[in-house]
Image (spheres, helix red, strand yellow):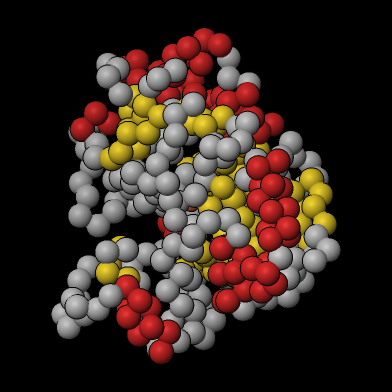
Amino acid sequence: MDIDVRPVDGARFGARISGVEPLALADEPAAADTLRRASVDHHGTLVFEFGRMLEVDELNALTAVFGRNEFAPGMITGYGKGSVDGEEELTVDEQVARLKTKGIDPYLLFLGNVNPRTEERVETTEKFFGEWEWHTDMSYIPNPPTFTLLHSRQIPLEGGDTGFCSQVLAAQTLPDELRNQVQGRRIKHDSTYSSNGALRVGMTEPATPIEAIGTYHPILRRLPGTEHEALFLGRRTNGYVENLPLGESEALLDALWAHATREDFTYRHTWQLGEVVVWDNRLVMHCRYPVDPSETRFMWRTQTVGEAVVSA
Ligand SMILES: [Fe+2]
């Protein structure tokens, strides 16, 4: 496989990659190593150019280079899906086989305002395509997903860019005063709201961030097996620094967020059809710019199995 890796234009991290044949990766360990190395070198932000749409198996094969394929939420019992009458006895493998007979891929999530079967536009709320602020997906669980892949199937004429923000650069340039304050400290990552700012099902708004329900993770993390440290902030809403009075926690978080989202740590990706962007949630935060709801935007998403956050 003749893989070409080159830095993206206009940013201090991220790479564009071409020449990859996803279904051949399993038999070419050197090619897979090249991609994993590129991810580390370019702060976990890779844009793959294929010049065509991928098949589901191809996206799953590319995902497998970066970790173990994670089931999409709500597909398999225990993976965001409750037990269903008559299915209590089914093993995971049996559930996967049953989905496949129905033509459903258990790893694939559909994102956007399109009916996945007909690929025609469906009506959405204003909020659905509003701005999604900087965040890391699902950081409120103990083992947040490591890699996320998005494959663009339909893109709007304008809008809907995805922003990335290197938390490796943020850690490298963290002022000593802030570094001293975060050393050994943890943030509670709130589970109240989803990415578009809506209350999650079954959640009520906490009185203050101290009461919010979520998971504590180290603020400064290390990427095992690499030279990288990264800030790990999750999302700003209801964040709380463990054991600090609320006022001090808010002031420290404000200072950290102002630093972590500096313009020169960011890359704004304008999508081309058929691209796959792979990012490492351990190294970057992401955001989505608004889309006009009269336009269509349709993405396939896959993820890799998560892991506990390792303290720097
Ligand atoms: Fe997200």
Left or right: 111 as drawn, with respect to 201: right
Above-or-below relation of 43 to 260: below
Give the residue at x 70% y 41%. Answer: 41
In the picture, measured across the screen, residue 295 lies left or right of residue 24, that is left
The residue at 62%/73% (across/down) is 58
> Residue 207: x and y, percent?
20, 33
**The one of 295 and 232 positioned closer to us in this rendering:** 232
Q: Specify the farthest residue to the left.
A: 85
Residue 100 at x, y percent in the picture: 42, 84
185 sits left or right of 7 in the view: left
Q: Residue at x 54, y 81 (%)?
A: 119
Count of labels in the image: 0
Judging depth in this view, the residue of 243 and 89 nearest the camera is 89
Q: Quadrant of residue 20?
A: bottom right
Residue 175 place in picture, x, y as percent? 58, 14
Q: Is residue 237 left or right of residue 228?
A: left
Residue closest to the far bottom: 101
Asked whether residue 131 appears in the rendered view, the answer is: no
Q: Is residue 60 above or below residue 179?
A: below
Locate the N terminus and report the quarter of the image it occupies. Answer: bottom right
Q: Is residue 116 above or below residue 286?
A: below
Query: Residue 221 appears at what percent x and percent y?
Result: 49, 31
Residue drawn at (48%, 63%) of the image? 69
Q: Does residue 31 appear in this view?
A: yes
